[in-house]
Amino acid sequence: MATPDAVFAGSVPANYDRYMGPLFFEPFARDVARRLSDLRAGALLETAAGTGIVTAALAAALPQAVTITATDLNQPMLDHAMAKPGMERVSFRQADAQGLPYADASFDAVVCQFGAMFFPDRVAAYREARRVLRPAGRFLFSIWDSVAHAPVARLALDALSRRFRRADAWFLERTPHGHFDPEVIRRDLRAAGWEAVRVETVTGIGRAASARSAAIALCQGTPMRAEIEAFGPDALSIATDAAAAEIAAQFGDGPFEAPSRALVMEATR
């Protein structure tokens, strides 16, 4: 069963893809495709594929001899991904990364971009990735660094925290940006049977059409929307306006580029 922080439904998938994608995900998706560019044949599995941002980059970059399977726990996210142009070559399936419905040694590569933070049992997910990989297969996944290294998200959270009183951390702090200690990640990977793991810090430069589009991305394109709406019927519009003003104060009202930072892990079976 999905936890509240892993539920992406309603209008969230469309807003997530339209607004979050260019600013936070597409630069790292291109990096994933580049890292796998030497895969000329075989089978690739993507877990936590979401709206297919990485899937699209892989489908465009890899030869037809590589079969691509994309999975996610959230069917509404997969529905959005399947409707995108260029996805005809991809097989989509709803699946839990902690219990994959595939036989041992089925794939030559497993990819997971910004999904591991949502897994209730990360060790189980890492163990499953290892199980379905063939000998010498690669596991490539990424995790956001702390929100201190994501200035647009940090500005939005600053604005929300001044207007709404919460007893605990916001969704963005506790989940997407809440699991970034390399030693904890390595410990979980070792517990799942992985040995040599390379960890690299990568900075991506994303783009937004405006400060408001960035605010919509964060306030309306993630499960944080439900947290905001719990404050009242006007809370979402108030929050979006406040976040937009805070972001505009640093980046301006119009189109802008901004960095965010991730940890990229690579391991071989």
Image (spheres, grey):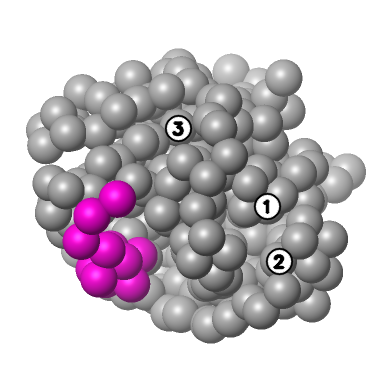
Q: Which residue is mark 1?
A: 126
Q: Which residue is mark 3?
A: 71
| Magenta-colored span | 32-42
First reached walking from the N terminus: tag 2 or tag 1? 1
Q: Tell me the SS state at disc 1.
A: helix
Q: Residue at (24%, 68%) from the top-left corner?
A: 37
Across and down, in percent, residue 101 comes to 57, 26
The answer for how far apart the CA atoms under marks 3 and 1 are is: 15 Å
Q: Residues within 10 Å of mark 3 (few under 14, many from 20)?
A: many
Q: Residues within 10 Å of mark 1 (few under 14, many from 20)?
A: many
207 displayed left or right of 264: left
Q: Is residue 183 visible?
A: yes
Do residues under tags 2 and 1 come within 8 Å of each other at their CB atoms?
yes
Q: Residue at (25%, 71%) from the top-left corner?
A: 38
Q: Residues within 10 Å of mark 2 (few under 14, many from 20)?
A: some
Do residues under tags 3 and 1 come within 8 Å of each other at their CB atoms?
no
Front label number (2 vs 1): 2
Q: Amino acid at mark 2?
A: Trp
The answer for how far apart the CA atoms under marks 2 and 1 are is: 8 Å
Across and down, in percent, residue 89 comes to 17, 34
First reached walking from the N terminus: tag 2 or tag 3? 3
First reached walking from the N terminus: tag 3 or tag 1? 3
Across and down, in percent, residue 23 comes to 33, 59
The answer for how far apart the CA atoms under marks 2 and 3 are is: 22 Å
131 displayed left or right of 169: left
Judge whether 171 appears above or below 139 on screen. Answer: above
Quarter of the image containing the N terminus? top right
Q: Amino acid at mark 3?
A: Thr
Q: Amino acid at mark 1?
A: Tyr
Across and down, in percent, residue 115 comes to 56, 48
Q: On the image, which quarter does residue 83 sit in?
A: top left
Res 194 label: 2
